[in-house]
Amino acid sequence: MELSKYEFDITKELISIALSNAADSFSKMANEKVLIQGFDVSILESKELFDLTLNLNSPEQYALKTEIKGRVIGKSYLIFSTDEIRKVFDIFAPGKPEPVAGSELDEFQKDILLEF
C-alpha cells in the first residue's frame, strides 16, 4: 500500500497524538514525567513485517501488539528491551520478580504491560 505524502503526514500526526496521550496516561500512573523521544512510522509489505517479527522473538525484546478497530483498522507494536521492561516493573510493581532475559513473562507481568 502506498500513501501520498499528505496521507503519510496525517498518519504520523495521528500516531503522535496517540503517543502523547499514552505518555500522559503513563505519567499519571507512574507519578513522574514521561517524554516521547521521537518515533518512526513505517509502511511495510507482508514479507518485511514477517522479517521484523522474527527479530522480535529474541530473548532481548518483548513486543506488545495493539489492534486498532473501528473506521480505521490496523495494528501497532511497542517493543521493549529486557532493561526497559525492568524499569516499567520497578515503577508499577516494586519488589516483584523481574523478567529474566530469554524467559516468558508471567501473567502478572503481562497484565502490567497491557495497562499501556
Image (tube, helix red, strand yellow):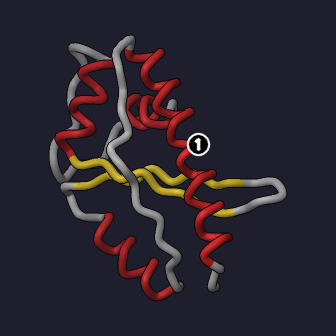
Quarter containing the N terminus: bottom right
Amino acid type, callout 1: Ile
**Point 36% across, 50% down: residue:** 38
Instruction: Please give the name of the residue rendered at 34% of the width and 15% of the height, measured from the top-left corner.
Output: 32
Number of numbered callouts drawn: 1
Residue 84 horizontal side relative to residue 52, left or right? left
**Rendering coords of residue 64 (x, y %):** 45, 50
Label 1 CA crowd tier, 10 Å (few <14, some 14–19, many 20+) = few
Quadrant housing residue 83: top left
Would you place residue 22 above or below residue 42 in this image? above
- Asked if residue 72 is positioned above or below residue 78 in the image, the reply reads below
x then y, percent, for residue 59: 20, 57
Residue 19 falls left or right of residue 11? left
**Residue furthest toward the front?**
6
Q: Is residue 36 above or below residue 102?
A: above
- The residue tagged 1 is 17
Q: Position of residue 73 (x, y in %)?
A: 73, 62
Residue 49 spot, x, y in % from top left: 45, 78
Residue closest to the far right: 71
Specify whether 74 is left or right of 46: right
Does dot 1 land on a helix, a strand or a loop?
helix
Residue nearer the viewer, 50 or 7? 7
| Picture residue at 47% right of the left edge, 65% below the top | 41
